[in-house]
Every structure is written in C-alpha cells, then in structure tokens.
C-alpha cells in the first residue's frame, strides 16, 4: 500500500492542509519545531485505525476553535487499486469512516482491513510507525527487561506482549496462591466453610418457625371476618354522624323552603337588574341636563366674543402684497450687503492694480489692456521665446567666461613657449651632437659579444671534463683565456673614448630635455589657440541667435497688440503681470455691472414698499425695513382676529349640534325609564322601588335555597335523600339521636374484640422474629449459593489467565524456533551495516537475554551500550520485523529516529533506510535540513510550505 495524498480538515492546529506524496521510495518531510510533523504522522495513523477514545492517554488533537476533527487520505493498493479513506468525528468513538474510489464507489468499513493487508494497530505502532519516544523507552529497562522487550517487539511490534505476560502473572497472584490467605479465591474458600456450619444450625430452627406460622395464619382469618362485620357497623355509624354534621345545612334548607312558599311566584315579575338599570338612567339624565346647561352658557359666551372682535378689511385685502414685500426683504438686505461688498472688492482690485503697476514701472490704460491679446497660444509662444532668450543668454554668459579663461591661458602659454625656446641650442650645434652620438653608438662593443666566447669555452671545458677526450678540454681552456683577454682590451678602449665625450653628452642631454618640453608646449599652445577660435565662433553664433529671438519678439508684439517697452517684454514674469492686470480689469468691470444691477433691484423694492405703506396709512420713515416689519405685524394681528372669528363660528356650530344631540338623548332616557315602569307593572317611582325590594328578597331566598340544594347534591345525596335527611334532623330528631348511640356501642364492642386478636398476633410475630434474628435459613442458603457461584467464577477467571499465559509461552517458544532466527539474522545484518562492521550480530540466549557481538567476539548486553547505539539496535530490529513479519510493501513512518546518531552512522543509517525503501514507501519526518545533503537524491518536502495551507 502507498500513501498518495493527505487532506486535513481539522486536526489540532492544522486546518485545511493538503499534501501530495511520491508513491514509493524514501521521502524526507522537513519542518521546523512545532510545524506539525508529529501531528501529521498521528493524523495518518488516525485515518488508518481511528481516533483514540477520550478516556485513553493518547492525544486526540481536538481543534481549539470547536470544529470537529477529521480529514481524508488517498492510498493505492497494488491489487485493490486507488481508494480514499475519509474519517471525521461523529457517532462512533473512532470516527465515522467513508471509503470510496475515484468513480465514487463506496465500501463498508470492513474493506479497510483488506486495504491494510490485515495490519493491526499494535504491529503498526510498534514496527511501522515509530519515533524518538519509542527509542527513549530503552533507558527505563534493565538488561533482562530490554531483551524481553526487543523480542516482544520482534513478535508483535511493540512491548505489549511483555506487558501482557506480566499482567497475566500479576492477575493470577491476585486471585489464588497455594499457601496464601489474602488472594480472593483463598478468602472465598474460608468463608464457604464457615457458611456450611451456619446453615446446619438454621435448618433446626426453621422447623419451630413453621408451627408458629400456621397458628398465626388461623388467627389472621378470624381477624379478617371480624373486620368485615366491624366495617358494616362503622359505615352505619358514619351515616349517622354525617347526618348530624350536616344538621345546620339541612335546617337552613328546610327554613328557606318554607320562606319561599310564602311568596306568590306569579306576581314576582320585575325587570332584570331593574333597580340598577333605573338608577343608571337617572345618572345619565343628570349628566345630560348638566351638559345642556353648559352648552347654553357657552353659546352665549361665543356671541359676546364675536361682537368684541374688530377686523380692518384693508389689511386683509393687501395681505398678498404685504407677504410678497416681507419675502423680498431678505433679498433687499442681501442687495445692500452686496453693494457694500462690491465697493470693497473694487477698492481691493484697484490696490492690487497699483501694486502691479508699481512693480512693472509703467502704467497701462484699460483700452490698451483690452487690445492686448493674451490667449493660451500667445502666452505659450511668448514663454517659448522667453525660454530661448534666457537659454541663449545663459550660454553666452558661460561662453564669455570660457573665452576669457582661454585667452588668459593662451597668453600664458605664448610667454612660456618664447622663454623656453630661447634656452635651446642653435640648430647647427644640435645637428653636430646628433652625428657624434651615432658614431659613439657604433663603436660600443656589445656585452653579449664578449660573453658568447666565454660561454662557449665553459661548455667545451665541461664536455671534456665529463668525457675521456682531453683535446676538447684543452681547446676549451685556450678559448676561455683568449675570450677574457680580448674582452679586457675592448673594455679599456671604450672607457677612454667615453671619458672624452662625457662633457659633451651632458650638454646635449639637457638640450634634448628642453627641446622635448618646447615641442609639447608648442602642441598645447596650438590646441588652446584652436579652442579659443572655436569659442569665439560659438559666441558670434549666439549673438546672431539673440538677434533672431529679439526680432521674433517684435513680431509677436505687433501681432498681439503689445505697445509697451520691448526690453521689458523679454523679462521673466513681466507678461504674467500684464495678464494679471488684464484679469483685474475684467473683474473690476464685472463688479461694476453687478453694482448697477443690485442698485436697480434695490430701488424697485424701495418704490414698491413706499407705495404699499401709503395704502396701509403707515409712514415710511428712514428705516424702510422697520416699516415693512410693522406692516407685517399689523397684518398678523388682523389675521389672528380673523382666524379667531372663524374658530368661534366653528365652535358655535359644533355646540349647536351637540345641544341638539343631548336634547335627543334626554328624550331617550325618559322613554327608557317609562319602559322599566311598564315592565315592572307599576305607575310611579315609589311603587317601582317597593316591588324591586320584594322581588329582590324572593330572588335571594331562591338562590340561597338552590345553592344549599346543590351543596347537598355535590355530597352524593339524591333529592329524595335530601328531603328524608331534612325530615330526620328536624321533625324526627330524637329518634335519630337514639339510633346513633346504639351504633356507637356496637362499634366499641367489636373494636375491643379486634384489638385482643391483634395483641395475640403480635405475640406470635415476636416469637417468630426471635427465631429469625440472624436471618432465615433460606436467606443464608441464598447467600451460600451466591458466594459459591462467585468462587466458581473466580476459579474460571484464574484458569483463563493460566491458560492464556501458557498459550503466550507456547507462542513465544514457537516464534523463537521459527521466525526469531530470521528476524535476528536481518537485524544483525542491518546493525552491522550501520556500525560498518564494528558489531557482527545480535543473539538471544536461552534465558531470553539479548547480547550484541562485536567483530572481535566480545559480547555486550544492551545496558552496556551508549544511548545512540542502543537506538540503532532498536531500529535494526524494527526494520527486520518489517521485512519478515509484516505485510509486504506497507509504508513506514519514522519521526527523527537518528537524532542521537553521529555523522558517520547517520549516513549509513540513511543509506540502509534507502535500501529498505526500494520496495515500499518510507516517510521520514525530520527538523534537520542537513539530512538532505546526506541523501541529495531523496525528495525533500518542506512542511507545511510545500503543502496547500488555507489556514494555519
């Protein structure tokens, strides 16, 4: 099986992480500390075998944000194909699992066993998925325990087998020991013996108990018969007592019935709630009459208020004109403010114009500014000309400075050249020195010409010396003597000639130096003269260019109406001042036009106001605004009076309508009161009240009698029974009293007899209880059987542990004879490769003690090894188990197992793991990036940077 991809929904700190893996060979998953490598490995384990339960010590990786843990993993099986295992937290402890292929076909959870090739979680965690925590278990074991632990790992993949074997021995000791007393089975055996003796004693006491029980049963039958008879007498006595308890109710019932019979039921006709209704109509009538009196007074008051109002019609007639004038008043005030603002604006513009005129030093009339054309095009043309002129002047200034520098330099060089030329020798004398120099050079004997014969002579001497030929040696000696003599002769001759010419050569050499300086200075003088001429030509050209630009400026001035000083036109910023003057002139004209318009509108308002005030008979005065406000105030007063008059008219109409409605209502009330008299069959108010009281007494008596009757009926008494009971408690009271006393005497007699029987039964109970003080025979027998059953269960449990331990021992012996040799052989080979032949093999002794054999035959126990070497032994055994015990091709997960290895053994370990990955997938999780340099051909996956991480 191969792991192809992983998608983590939520698992610890990892959220929405995706990772794609190679289908085979070794792969390094690199991540820094706390990057989630161990979390990723545990996620893969959970996808295969489920999430751990909450009561287990293993971490569940529940997300902090409350989401459910889960994800999916795609695997490929060589026989079953590619499948996706999806597992999320759900109803099951291990999570809800879904298995489906690329086409969407789904399988049951049992199909996962086929994909895993029968791999169980114990073997997987022991041999196929391990890390540093598994290696650290070795530090806590003794030599024997370490041997057993490693053998258990070889069998099952982890130390579970060793722990199970120890658990079996512990459980057996807790249940039973031959000479022990504290084990559970031993204690149960002692208690069973004690309970057998107790049962024998209780068997005898049980026979006496049966006789007393039969006597008690006979007495209880007699008591039941007496109880039935007593119940009949008590029922009759209860009826009598109940009759006397109901005596007040029955007497009231009888009295109310006699009282009702005194009334004539046919004459008891009266409207329902007649008195109450009549009084309500009286109250209504009183209210209506009060309202009528108030309305009459209010109508009279309104007529007086209308008479007091004095309305002048001229204000109402000119209402529209007054409002229009008032609405225009803010506009008039705004016009006055505008006029003042315009005056300040004109003053500000004139001040600004004066400032600009003073700055440019000339005055421009408005008509001249209007004729001056300053469009964007003309301004742009002027700016171009100005830039050109400024550029030309700047270049001209720099050329003039360079020309002056060049002139000064040229004069200095001419003076220096003339002075240096005077120091030179005449041409005839310089030519004679040149001829003598050439002759001297021809007479000089070259050094190499003297050295060549000497070298040849030395070679001949060496050749004769190394060979038996003495003639060659002799010739070499003769040639060496002749060469030295000739060289000395020529050297003396040359020295005498050079002494005569030394003085002449010094003078010649000084002249030669001066001549070279003069030639260089002449060339530099020529160059500086050329530069000076070029600068002069460029200056002439710039003057022509300056004249051309000035002509263009004149043409521009004629074209656009400029009549000012031409020199100022070429000054920077001058045209901007003119443009500003032109704009200010326009603004001043616009403001003056606005002043005329505002003055015109203000005059129209003043004329209209004066005319209206004359119609309203109001003096205008100096403050026109105050007069307009006064007219509006007077108008509002008249409008208020008009609105008040209209409101009074409206109220008067409403009051008339209300008065008519109350008059109709008064008539209706009188009619309703007459109907009540008619229904009560009376003609006046006094008879109505008298009959109402009589009918009320009859009604109350009837209701009270019905309530008493219903109360007795609620007790379950019939109508005939009520009449009979009322007769007995009133007319037949003495006879009823004697009958109740007779029943009470009979009841007391039977109660005394029943109490005697009860006391006799209590005596029998006490004697029977005495026999059962320590429990009954059946109870002890039941306890004995229960304890015996518990003892049998414990014995079966002990036997099960015994058989399981025996079976485990058989498995270990079988494994030691069959598979253990192959595992030891493979692990020895792996350990030998890791240590590069330092250790030869791993063996197990007859006492299950593991020993490590070095190349020289020396044996070591695991406790004598260093920590790193012990971990290498552990790794070798794990890889051997994978090779010999587990399913072929199942992937292996390793988490930084080489942390404690040195550099050499780390390289050999990684090479060994690479060999193991030829036929399976191995995922090596690490935080050490240098491992990739050890195995550069192995793919390195950076976690989580090479994964798709939506949220981290």
Image (cartoon, rainbow, N blue to C red):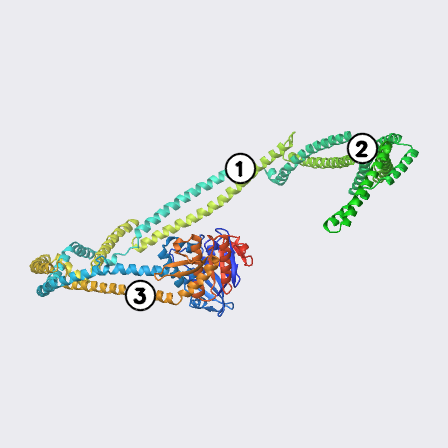
Name the residue that disc number 1 marks: 309
Q: Position of residue 526 (x, y in %)?
A: 87, 36
Which residue is farthest right?
428
Name the residue that disc number 3 marks: 806
Pointers 2 and 3 in contact (CB under 8 A)? no
Q: Is 685 or 601 nearer to us in this picture?
A: 601
Is 495 left or right of 917, judged from the image as shown?
right
**Residue 391 visible in this rendered orientation of the protein:** yes
Q: Position of residue 762 (x, y in %)?
A: 9, 59
Q: Give residue 362's quadrant in the image.
A: top right
Find numbered disc 2 in the image and state the secondary structure of the residue it sits on. Answer: loop
Is 875 left or right of 456, judged from the image as shown?
left
Disc on the earlier residue, 3 or 1: 1
Q: Position of residue 890 (x, y in %)?
A: 47, 64
In whole angstroms, how far apart are the C-alphas of marks 2 and 1? Answer: 73 Å
Find numbered disc 1 in the image and state the secondary structure of the residue it sits on. Answer: loop
Q: Is residue 635 above or below residue 789?
A: above
Find numbered disc 3 in the image and state the secondary structure of the residue it sits on. Answer: helix
Q: Is 311 or 764 nearer to us in this picture?
A: 764
Pointers 3 and 1 in contact (CB under 8 A)? no
Is 711 left or right of 516, judged from the image as shown?
left
Name the residue that disc number 2 marks: 364
Nearest-to-viewer mark from 2 and 1: 2
Q: Characterize the local packing of mark 3: few (<14), some (14-19) or many (20 or more) Cα atoms within 10 angstroms.
A: some
Q: Is 524 or 499 nearer to us in this picture?
A: 499
In whole angstroms, how far apart are the C-alphas of marks 3 and 1? Answer: 130 Å
Nearest-to-viewer mark from 3 and 1: 3
**Residue 96 visible in this rendered orientation of the protein:** no
Q: Characterize the local packing of mark 2: few (<14), some (14-19) or many (20 or more) Cα atoms within 10 angstroms.
A: some
Q: Give residue 323's quadrant in the image.
A: top right
Disc on the earlier residue, 2 or 3: 2
Q: Position of residue 679 (x, y in %)?
A: 31, 55
């Amino acid at each position: 099986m191969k792991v192809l991809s992983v998608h983590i929904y939520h698992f610890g700190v990892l959220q929405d992480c995706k990772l794609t893996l190679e289908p085979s060979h070794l792969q390094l998953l690199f991540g820094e500390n706390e990057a989630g490598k161990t979390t990723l490995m545990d996620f893969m384990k959970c996808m295969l075998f489920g999430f751990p339960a909450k009561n287990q010590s293993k971490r569940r990786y529940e997300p902090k944000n409350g989401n459910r843990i889960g994800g999916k993993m795609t695997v490929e099986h060589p026989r079953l194909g590619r499948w996706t295992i999806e597992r999320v937290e759900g109803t099951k402890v291990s999570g809800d699992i879904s298995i489906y292929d690329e086409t969407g076909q789904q399988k049951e959870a049992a199909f996962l066993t086929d994909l895993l090739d029968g791999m169980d979680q114990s073997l997987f965690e022991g041999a196929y998925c391990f890390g540093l925590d598994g290696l650290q278990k070795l530090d806590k074991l003794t030599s024997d325990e370490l041997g057993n632990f490693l053998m258990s790992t070889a069998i099952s993949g982890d130390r579970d087998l060793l722990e199970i074997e120890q658990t079996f021995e512990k459980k057996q000791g807790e249940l039973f020991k031959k000479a022990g007393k504290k084990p559970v089975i031993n204690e149960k055996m002692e208690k069973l013996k004690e309970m057998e003796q107790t049962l024998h004693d209780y068997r005898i006491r049980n026979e006496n108990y049966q006789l007393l029980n039969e006597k008690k049963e006979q007495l209880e039958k007699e008591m039941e018969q007496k109880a039935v008879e007593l119940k009949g007498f008590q029922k009759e006595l209860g009826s009598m007592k109940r009759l006397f308890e109901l005596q007040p109710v029955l007497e009231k019932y009888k009295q109310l019935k006699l009282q009702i019979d005194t009334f004539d039921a046919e004459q008891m006709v009266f409207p329902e709630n007649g008195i109450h209704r009549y009084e309500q109509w009286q109250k209504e009538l009183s209210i209506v009459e009060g309202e009528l009196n108030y309305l009459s007074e209010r109508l009279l008051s309104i007529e007086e208020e209308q008479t007091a109002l004095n309305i002048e019609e001229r204000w109402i007639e000119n209402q529209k004109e007054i409002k229009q004038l008032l609405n225009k008043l803010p506009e008039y005030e705004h016009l006055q403010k505008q006029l003042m603002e315009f005056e300040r604006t004109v003053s500000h513009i004139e001040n600004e114009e004066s400032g600009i005129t003073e700055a440019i030093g000339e005055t421009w009339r408005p008509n001249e500014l209007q004729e001056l054309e300053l469009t964007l095009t003309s301004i742009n043309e002027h700016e171009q000309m100005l830039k050109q002129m400024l550029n030309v002047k700047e270049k001209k200034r720099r050329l003039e400075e360079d020309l002056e520098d060049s002139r000064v330099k040229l004069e200095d060089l001419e003076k220096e050249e003339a002075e240096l030329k005077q120091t030179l020798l005449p041409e005839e004398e310089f030519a004679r020195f040149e001829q003598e120099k050439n002759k001297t050079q021809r007479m000089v004997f070259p050094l190499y010409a003297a050295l060549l014969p000497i070298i040849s002579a030395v070679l001949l001497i060496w050749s004769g010396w190394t060979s038996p030929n003495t003639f060659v040696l002799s010739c070499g000696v003769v040639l060496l003597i002749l060469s030295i003599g000739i060289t000395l002769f020529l050297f003396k001759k040359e020295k005498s000639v050079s002494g005569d010419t030394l003085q002449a050569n010094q003078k010649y050499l000084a002249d030669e130096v001066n001549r070279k300086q003069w030639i260089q200075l002449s060339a530099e003088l020529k160059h500086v003269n050329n530069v000076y001429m070029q600068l002069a030509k460029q200056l002439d050209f710039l003057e022509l260019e300056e004249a051309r630009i000035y002509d263009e400026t004149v043409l521009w001035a004629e074209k656009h109406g400029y009549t000012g000083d031409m020199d100022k036109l070429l000054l920077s910023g001058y045209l901007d001042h003119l443009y500003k003057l032109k704009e200010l002139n326009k603004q001043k004209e616009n403001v003056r036009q606005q002043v005329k318009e505002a003055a015109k509108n203000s005059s129209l308002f003043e004329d209209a106001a004066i005319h209206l005030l004359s119609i309203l008979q109001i003096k205008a005065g100096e403050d026109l605004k105050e007069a307009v406000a006064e007219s509006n105030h007077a108008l509002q007063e008249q409008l208020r009076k008009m609105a008040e008059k209209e409101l009074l008219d409206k109220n008067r109409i409403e009051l008339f309508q209300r008065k008519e409605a109350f008059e109709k209502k008064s008539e209706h009330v009188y009619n309703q009161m007459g109907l009540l008299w008619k229904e009560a069959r009376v003609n006046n108010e006094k008879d109505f009240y008298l009959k109402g009281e009589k009918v009320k007494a009859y009604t109350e008596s009837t209701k009270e009698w019905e309530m008493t009757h219903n109360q007795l009926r609620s007790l379950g008494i019939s109508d005939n029974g009520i009449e009979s009971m009322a007769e007995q408690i009133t007319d037949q009271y003495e006879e009823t009293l004697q009958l109740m006393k007779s029943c009470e005497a009979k009841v007391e007699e039977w109660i005394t007899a029943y109490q005697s029987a009860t006391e006799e039964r209590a005596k029998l109970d006490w004697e029977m209880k005495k026999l059962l003080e320590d429990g009954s025979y059946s109870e002890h027998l039941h306890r004995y059987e229960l304890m015996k059953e518990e003892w049998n269960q414990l014995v079966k449990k002990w036997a099960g542990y015994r058989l399981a331990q025996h079976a485990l021992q058989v498995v270990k012996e079988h494994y030691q004879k069959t598979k253990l040799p192959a595992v030891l052989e493979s692990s020895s080979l792996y350990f030998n490769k890791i240590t590069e032949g330092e250790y030869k093999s791993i063996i197990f002794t007859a006492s299950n003690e593991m020993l490590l054999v070095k190349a020289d035959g020396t044996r070591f126990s695991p406790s004598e090894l260093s920590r790193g070497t012990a971990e290498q032994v552990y790794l070798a055994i794990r890889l051997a188990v994978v090779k010999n015990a587990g399913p072929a091709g199942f992937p292996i997960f390793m988490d930084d197992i080489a942390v404690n290895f040195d550099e050499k053994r780390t390289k050999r370990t990684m090479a060994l793991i690479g060999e193991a990955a030829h036929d399976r997938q191995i995922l090596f999780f690490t935080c050490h990036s240098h491992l990739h340099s050890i195995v550069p051909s192995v793919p390195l996956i950076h976690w989580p940077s090479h994964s798709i991480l939506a949220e981290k």
